Amino acid sequence: MTGIHNGLRIVWHYAASDERRTFTLSYRFRGLAVAYDDVVDVNLRVWGDHWPASLDSLTAAMQLPRATELSPSYRTWGSPAWVRGVVKRLPDRALLQASRVPAHQFVELRAVFPRGLLDSTGGAQVRQGSGLEKIVAGEARSQREYERDRRRIDDAKRHLGRTFIYLLFLGQGPAVALMLLVWLLYGRERRTGYDREYEQAPPSDTEPALVPSLLRQATTPGSNEFTATLFDLIRRGRYKSTPVTTERSIWGGLRHQDVADLLLTVGDANMQLAGFEKPVVEVVDSVVVGDGERLSAFRDRIEADRASNSKRFMSFKEKVSSAIDARRWYLGDGLRVLGTGILVFVLLAIVLLWIGIHGFRSAAPRWSDVVTVALGICAGANAASLIFGATKVTLWRRRTAAGQTEAERWEAFRRYLTDFPRLQEAPPATLELWERYLVYGIAFGIAERVLQGAHLLMPEALHEQSSLYWITPTGDLGSGPTSLAISDLSSGFGSALAPPGSSGGGGGFSGGGGGGGGGGGGGAW
């Protein structure tokens, strides 16, 4: 015999072989019976909910102090209502019979009889006033609550479409409303009054590695930005380029064709570089060391030392992000609001689910428990939606006034380069401007449009001076080899600079581009 909580655990051992043995346990309750002025209430849990096995049949009898007539002041109930069973009033005892009692399911027998049957109330709780009316009303109320819960649950099952709409509204409505409010207050871009459709020259000296991120309202560069930085370094003289042609096999080696190419060698090694340009220089210097290298061979040379070059590219991305942060183009106050909403919904989901699941009755769920669990799931769904919304920076972040003004001007310049016929109205007059067009066109992902314009409009004298325009989209300005497409270069760099072990196809880059004991259960038998 050992003590547990406020009770005792009694264990006995026996041996039996092919025989039935019956054990009789006797113990005395004190304080279980409640004596009112008119009746005595005995509510006994005859089967506990701690048993891990089900029970085929259960019989329990409560012996009265002495026999009595079957009057209105003598009542019996069995509970809970969802257990299959019957109760009987006999003159000398109350009888309960139940069948198929599930595991972990309690069963209670309650009997109310006239107080006059007791010779003494020494072992009972004594309470003033009449008790019969209150007891009967309580049992009736429990029965009504059980039936009401069952009707509500059945109604929800019958009308699944309506239930789904309610759950969808509760599970997404608050999160959608909060995200809309955050976007209106913190994410929606404010117009600056800038009304020009086109800018015919780069509106500022912002480096090509940074501009696409500004238009996308992002901080992470892609393969286009890396390629544009390389061509910008060529334009500024960090590398020298010599137009050459390279023979390339096509049709499985059955034919060969000459491809326009550039041979790169080291130029002005003392040039002042931005922080994010240094990793690009480290990659290119490792390729062009010695007598230089052709652009068409860059991919294979970079892949030959992928481990080192992928680290250099990661450094390029990090330093571009740092440079963007330093320019303070963005306001991100909306993220704090979303974060607070996520925290509130997560805590709400935890509390509601704990309350609902802790008190949940699988045999006969209460409507309140079902609603509590459903609200907890809806709170979790709202939290998940807000987490997803937090990954969409344009929802909670916008540009500063200065950043928005610059973005609108760069967007106008991008439209000018994209709208190819406009180049015919005012083509660039200088080689420097033509080459800046190409560099930013690469960053925006529209280099082919700029090359088309150059093919039709660029004076041959300027073309012969350019270190960039040997590569053309559909032929050249005079010598005839097929083009080496810049888009192929960009995607090739993306694949070559991907970390070792990653899938091919430019896995190391983002997109790039320009746009942006007692006590009863409920009910009775």
Image (cartoon, rainbow, N blue to C red):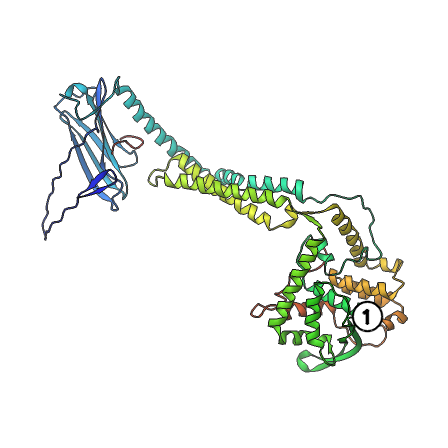
Residue at (10% x, 51% y) in the render: 16
Residue 352, quarter of picture: top left
Name the secondary structure under disc 1.
loop
- Towards the viewer: 460 or 11: 11
Task: Identify whether 125 is placed above or below 169.
Answer: above
Residue 40, quarter of picture: top left
Q: Which image quarter holds the C terminus?
A: top left
Q: Which image quarter holds the N terminus?
A: top left
Task: Identify whether 400 is placed above or below 431.
Answer: above
Amino acid under disc 1: Tyr
Q: Can residue 389 be seen in this view?
A: yes
Q: Is residue 136 left or right of residue 298?
A: left
* Whole-percent x, y for residue 311 in the image: 62, 68
- Towards the viewer: 295 or 326: 326
Query: Mark 1: few, some, or many residues within 10 Å (few <14, many ≥20)?
Result: many
Residue at (58% x, 68% y) in the render: 503
Residue identifier under label 1: 469
* Whole-percent x, y for residue 260 in the image: 78, 75
Residue at (70% x, 68% y) in the render: 280
- Towards the viewer: 174 or 182: 182
Q: Is residue 511 visible?
A: no
* Whole-percent x, y for residue 370 in the image: 41, 38
Task: Identify whether 86 is placed above or below 242.
Answer: above
- Towards the viewer: 28 or 75: 28
Residue at (72% x, 77% y) in the render: 288
* Whole-percent x, y for residue 239 in the image: 77, 72
